[in-house]
Amino acid sequence: MRFGIIGAGRIGKIHASNVAARKDCEVRLIADADRSAAQSLAEATGGRVAEIDAILASNEIDAVAICAPTDMHADLIEKAARAKKAIFCEKPVDLDANRVRACLEVVAATGAILMVGFNRRFDPNFASLQQRIRDGAIGAVEIVQITSRDPSPPPVSYISRSGGLFRDMMIHDFDMARFLLGEEPVAVSAMGSALVDKAIGEAGDVDTAVVILETKSGKVAQISNSRRATYGYDQRIEAHGSKGMLRADNIRETSVEFAGAQGFASDKVLNFFLERYAAAYRDELDAFVKAASAGVAPRPNGEDGLRANLLADAANLSWRTKQRVALG
């Protein structure tokens, strides 16, 4: 499969490198507003630098990986769909749910293959946990708890263009909650504060938040987010059901543990998402390539992206109004 990479930043480098490492794929063309970044990535992966329109028009491109800024995603998806390319796009499709809906109409009308990058579904530990739930290991799911805490907050300049914590950070957890519950949430309750960086609060956002999701049958998901974790990148999941509990814990720098008179001590958890989810990004690409090669719709798809957006919007509304928000 011949790829065009749109966006040569941090996430573009991850996807391009993973494509280049596969025997059944290759990086052909790379575009970025910063031509030097595109050139550097092209040299590292064996591709060539090109403009976005040239990538979409090229007969030597089968699939595009959209790793550009969020406000470009929907337009690029539509252009790629009309150009008959298989599309992998980093989350979100757009920050506005109505714009997402309009984009998905184009995808449906053109019959394009679209996969949205909720990579955490492909983390080996989380994927195994979800499969065991589906296999009935814990019986009927009752409570899902998702913990996601960053090592440190982003620059305040990032907050305004990211859409805020619920739409940028917690959106991964909304998708994971749906993935594990197996049932759509019908109500959202959110609480949040700016405890890590006052400037984030002054920018109209939160850096510390808890959200409760409820399903029609009464299942509950609790999501805890923070922009600060002094011990590293905190990523944990627990699912409790009628027959037991499943848990996926953090991944540490090493599995070595020291035991002494003062107790037990282990190494810190991995410090950043690029390290923590390295395997997830590889497996995510594998799922996309297999689906696109077979001409079948991959998951997570555009509808999954839309539903995560709607949960983020509901959480944001709940936080601002201090009210439980029902989903239509």
Image: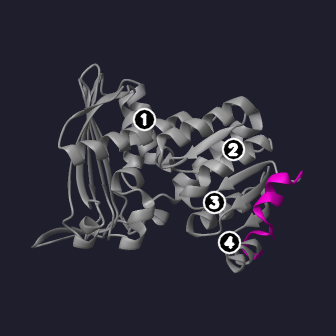
Q: Which numbered dot is residue 179?
A: 1
Say what amino acid the circle numbered 3 marks. His
SS at mark 2 in the image: helix
* Mark 3–mark 1 CB contact (< 8 Å): no
* Mark 1–mark 4 CB contact (< 8 Å): no
Say what amino acid the circle numbered 4 marks. Ala
Say what amino acid the circle numbered 1 marks. Phe
283 or 75: nearer the eye?
A: 75
Density class for disc 1 (Cα within 10 Å; few <14, some 14-19, many ≥20) is some
Residue 52 on the magenta span: yes
Q: Find residue 270 and report its image quarter.
A: bottom left
Taking the view exactly as shown, the residue that stands out farthest to the left is: 261
Say what amino acid the circle numbered 2 marks. Glu
Q: Find residue 105 and report its image quarter.
A: top right
Residue under circle 2?
Answer: 78
Q: What is the C-alpha distance between the residues marked 1 and 2? A: 26 Å
Residue 302, percent across and down? 57, 37
Disc with the residue nearer the chain's start (3 vs 1) = 3
Residue 182, percent across and down? 40, 27
Q: Which residues are magenta?
A: 43-59
Q: What is the C-alpha distance between the residues marked 3 and 1? A: 23 Å
SS at mark 1 in the image: helix
Is 11 drawn above or below residue 239 in the view shown?
Answer: below
Disc with the residue nearer the chain's start (1 vs 4) = 4
Residue under circle 3?
Answer: 15
Q: Is residue 239 left or right of residue 71?
A: left
Density class for disc 2 (Cα within 10 Å; few <14, some 14-19, many ≥20) is many
Is 302 drawn above or below residue 54 in the view shown?
Answer: above
Q: Of circles 3 and 4, which is in front?
A: 4
